Image (tube, grey):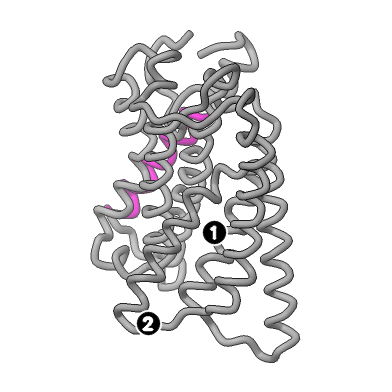
Amino acid sequence: MFNAPVFVGYINHLSFHSPTQNLMLIFVVPTSLVALRAISPRPFRNLNQRAFFTLLAILVILLLSLSKPSYSIALLPALGLLVLYRVIRRLPIDWWLLIFGIGVPSLLMLLLQYIVTYSDPQRPSIAVGWLTFFNVHLEGTVDVLTRLALSMVFPSVVYLLHAREARKDDYLTLAWLTFGLSLIWAYLFYETGRRTADGNFVWSSYAAMLVLMFSSLLFLIKQYATQPFKLSWRLALSAAVFLLHVGSGVYAAISVATFGYL
């Protein structure tokens, strides 16, 4: 039972009980960096390097998808929107990596997992319902939105304080768009039957939030570590908010390990 919505950095309370979720989180950042390389390409030195990177991308995608498809279902539509934008603006795209390194293996794995999990009428299916899962486990919409707002404090502060530079950062754009789409999965879709209480679609927002945190931290490092250090109030405020997230995570981990609840 929760005393207050202090679990900053998480969308809700399901963070420790799923081994497959923890395994998936190992691969979400590498997958996001592969996706970044596809929409913001850099030239390969030779054909062997391209082939090696494509095979590495396929391996990462397969490992991610085998652990859980939650991040893929948000990343793929985000990539689709960014690709459409870049096509309209006539910006470069690594089509080979996008199609054969990311798109084909991801779609094949999603199709296979859907057939195995939902094709039998006797098994659980996917349904649409606004906050259905959360209404079962939390006290209402206000609590859900409070947790969402607290989870977004650090990336929001970083983006707002560095808006001009952040708008030009492809990784931040990808991370924010993926996170936004992950919330659609988390808040609008749920599973019926015996899996209703599992919250499997909520894991999409967990994974996307991790990438958003990482990309925001990486953005700060690029902004301030690549030039002579100069104390900035924007950096100080961003760092302070980040430490609040870290402190909240430590508190949550200790509380769960010690008492079994927050």
Q: Residue at x 50, y 38 (%)?
A: 206
- The amino acid type found where label 1 is placed reads Ser
* Residue 15 visible to the viewer: yes
Please tell me whether residue 220 is drawn above or below residue 68 in the rendered image: below
Q: Position of residue 12 (x, y in %)?
A: 45, 25
Q: Badge 1: few (under 14), some or many (20 or more) residues near its Cα, within 10 Å? A: many
Q: Which residues are magenta?
A: 234-249
User: Residue 70 sits in which quadrant?
Assistant: top right
Q: Residue at x 45, y 72 (%)?
A: 226
Please tell me whether residue 146 is drawn above or below residue 84 in the rendered image: above
Q: Secondary structure at mark 2?
A: loop
Q: Position of residue 261 (x, y in %)?
A: 55, 11
- The amino acid type found where label 2 is placed reads Leu
Residue for badge 2? 91
Of the pair 218 and 180, the residue shown nearer to us: 180
- Horizontal placement of 44 versus 192: left or right? right
Q: Secondary structure at mark 1?
A: helix
Whether residue 248 appears in magenta in the rendering, the answer is: yes
Badge 1 vs badge 2, beta-carbon distance below 8 Å: no
* Residue 251 visible to the viewer: no
Of the pair 82 and 2, the residue shown nearer to us: 82
Please tell me whether residue 203 is drawn above or below residue 258 in the rendered image: below
Q: Main secondary structure of the magenta part?
A: helix
Q: Earlier in the sequence, mark 1 or mark 2?
A: 1
User: Which is more foreground, mark 1 or mark 2?
Assistant: 2
User: Residue 162 sits in which quadrant?
Assistant: bottom left
Q: Position of residue 136 (x, y in %)?
A: 43, 13
- Horizontal placement of 211 versus 166: left or right? right
Q: Residue at x 37, y 26 (%)?
A: 129
Of the pair 11 and 87, the residue shown nearer to us: 87
Q: Which mark is residue 32?
A: 1
